[in-house]
Image: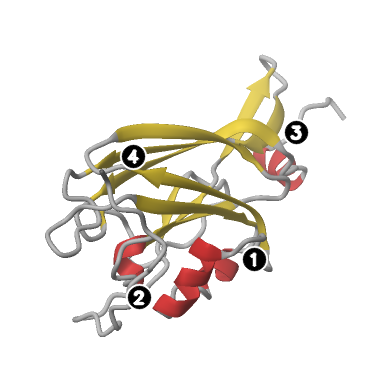
Amino acid sequence: MFGGNSQADALGKLQWGYQDRSIDVVWSADRALNSHGETSHTLLLAILQCTDPNVFKAYVTEPEKLATLLSAKTVPQGFLQVDRVFVQPGSDGAISLARAQNAQYVGVVAGYYALEPARVARLYRIGVSVDSQGFLIKTRTASPASLQINLQLGPDGLLGGESSRALPRAPVQPKAGEVPITEPSPESTTSRVPYSDRAKTS
């Protein structure tokens, strides 16, 4: 044996450990953010980390389930960490979070008055970096990459995103980015359920 290893070997030894300040959430909010009755309101964002994406997807089937992620006083079953932040209308901001041990996905729920899953929920996959050292004989090491989530917060929902597109086949080396959480439909039939815990802006 001459040493060195392949990318597959490196990925096989990948460890999803804790890492401080590894997830950045950046937002830009519309001045008419979370409008209700011609008045803008503060918006609550819940940022949830998990190992299995299906844990998050199970909550986006009904508005009532999404509401529990916004209001839960403890970390919901299946999740590793929950962080919450209030966003003011017309504001730009960012928050840097630690990546929890074993976290591979990050879900975001925005507490708009109408909790329509396709408009208020997003799911992102944490990417993996493979570094190599050596000239002729390569030694490769795989590690979770930092993730930046950019959110455009519109008057009544998240703008843009991949949530209406088909989920692509997972690559051998995971790449960072948003993961679809709902199947495309010709017309949303989700009921509009208000989320009550919101503070009016002064």
Q: Nearer the viewer, residue 6 or 24?
A: 24
Label 1 neighbour load within 10 Å: few <14, some 14-19, many 20+: some
Tell me the residue that label 2 is attached to.
Answer: 183
The quarter of the picture where residue 53 lies is bottom right
Residues under labels 3 and 2: Cα distance?
39 Å
Percent across and percent down for residue 134 are: 70, 16
Q: Nearer the viewer, residue 68 or 165?
A: 68
Q: Are marks 1 and 2 in contact (CB under 8 Å)?
A: no
- The residue that appears at 68% across and 17% down in the rendered structure is 136
Tell me the residue that label 4 is attached to.
Answer: 27
What element does badge 1 sit on? loop
Badge 3 amino acid:
Asn
Q: Is residue 189 left or right of residue 96?
A: left
Residues under labels 3 and 4: Cα distance?
40 Å
- The residue that appears at 27% across and 36% down in the rendered structure is 91
Q: Are marks 4 and 2 in contact (CB under 8 Å)?
A: no
Residues under labels 1 and 3: Cα distance?
39 Å
Q: Earlier in the sequence, mark 1 or mark 3?
A: 3
What element does badge 4 sit on? strand
Outermost front residue: 202
Q: Which mark is residue 76?
A: 1
